[in-house]
Image: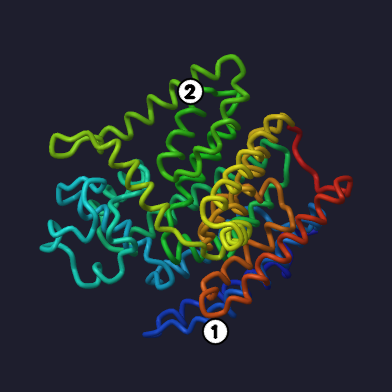
Amino acid sequence: MPAFRGSWIVLAVLLEAALAVVVRLAQAPVFPLLPGLAWISAAGLVYLIAAAAVLHSPPQRLPRVRWILLAALVFRLTLLPLTPTLAGTAMRFRWDGKIQQAGFNPYAYAPQNAFFNPIRSPQEAAALPEPGVAAYHPPLAELLFRWNYAWFPGLRAQKILVTALDLLLLGVLVRMLKRRQQPPQWVLLYAWSPLAVFEVAGNGHLEPAAALFALLALHWAGRRLRPAALALASAALTQWYALLLLPAVLAPAGRRWLSSLAWLLGWGAVLTLPFLFANQQFLLGRIAANLRAHFAAQVPYNASLFALLHAWFGPPAAAAVAALLVAAAVATTRARHLEPLRAAFVILGALLLALPQVHPWTLLCLLPLLVFFPEAPWLYFSVAVLWAYAVAPHPFLVALEYLPLYALLAWQALRPRRRALPQAAA
């Protein structure tokens, strides 16, 4: 019986067609938001059908991994020519690399500073997010921005870098699935996700770099302590959220956790060192101040729990309860002695429910873990979250995003003994 069935080809072609229409619509002078989101939703529906099929089909009916990866490559190549239209973060990445190449420390001066008048174009002045706040991304991310701008300063070249990291992430996922004795075809849950394709190859977000380092840290936790510590430090200095994974990586080290922490802090200091001084000033406090200013500027956007708390009790109470929720998730993973990957899944899921802003690309921190824990609530949300681009003109879409998510999470919590898909032993 052939391992690769014609139905999988049909699903791949349908998904590719929907993504191609999105690219065509995005090439218009003004992106038609609702038709674009309709086609993204169509891609999401095809993806959910493919996800259900790969999770519930017998092994002999599953496609070969190489065909899944080939289709994933085609999907990403389709969106690489797309100029980012729904997010300004790619422009900010390029700006931070540009001023570093010009000899400026990105943490020292905000983009609107008069120092940059000779090199700041009108397009950059109009498109840069948070122009009054200096760099707030972690140091390794800033180094990647600089290296990418030095080699190829264009936005599309920047997308090539993150797409290459995304493809490398797919290879790591396949290897980890095989090691955990889970079907390697489950890599489809990330490889064919319209969210991953659109936000990485389409909008050029950096999350695959942090996810790659974080997965390696979780994979090595308890077995290869030094590489795990170095990988986690690299993840945290690419995206700040990875700091929450510290307990999940250090706990399996047992009595050697202090040595692992020392390696983590040491490597973090090395990566931060290029940015610690500017104009004979020590900038660690400036980096922290930039980060505080960035978070202080965030208003609730496409949030769930945080938005309700913010409306009922005000920002301080909302922030306190959100922090307590994430802390409770971390404590629960330690009390239940969850394996590193499962602990990370629980922690990042709680974080997404508690965040004040949930942009579609925010979910990319959790999406690779769905390969190992393919739970229906988050698979649905990975498709529905793309509607966040229309939240401002169409607030009712928030309910379509979150009500099924919370309903499915509640159903899942009330049925703990349901028959589960095969999982690797912890």
Q: How many marks?
A: 2
Residue 342 placement (x, y as % from top left)? 68, 39
Q: Secondary structure at mark 2?
A: helix
Characterize the local packing of mark 2: few (<14), some (14-19) or many (20 or more) Cα atoms within 10 angstroms.
Answer: many
Q: Which amino acid, mark 2?
A: Leu
- Is residue 171 positioned above or below 339 on the image? below
- Is residue 215 positioned above or below 72 on the image? above
Q: In this image, 94 relative to 173: left or right?
A: left
Label annotation for residue 35: 1
According to the image, what is the colour scheme of the structure? rainbow
The residue under label 2 is 261
Depth-wise, is mark 2 or mark 1 nearer the camera?
2
Compare residues 172 and 350 and report the one nearer the observer: 350
Quadrant assignment for the N terminus:
bottom right
Q: Which amino acid, mark 1?
A: Pro
Q: Secondary structure at mark 1?
A: helix
Which comes sooner in the sequence, label 2 or label 1? 1
Q: Residue at x 53, y 36 (%)?
A: 216
- Is residue 261 positioned above or below 7 on the image? above
Label annotation for residue 145: none
- Is residue 364 positioned above or below 383 on the image? above
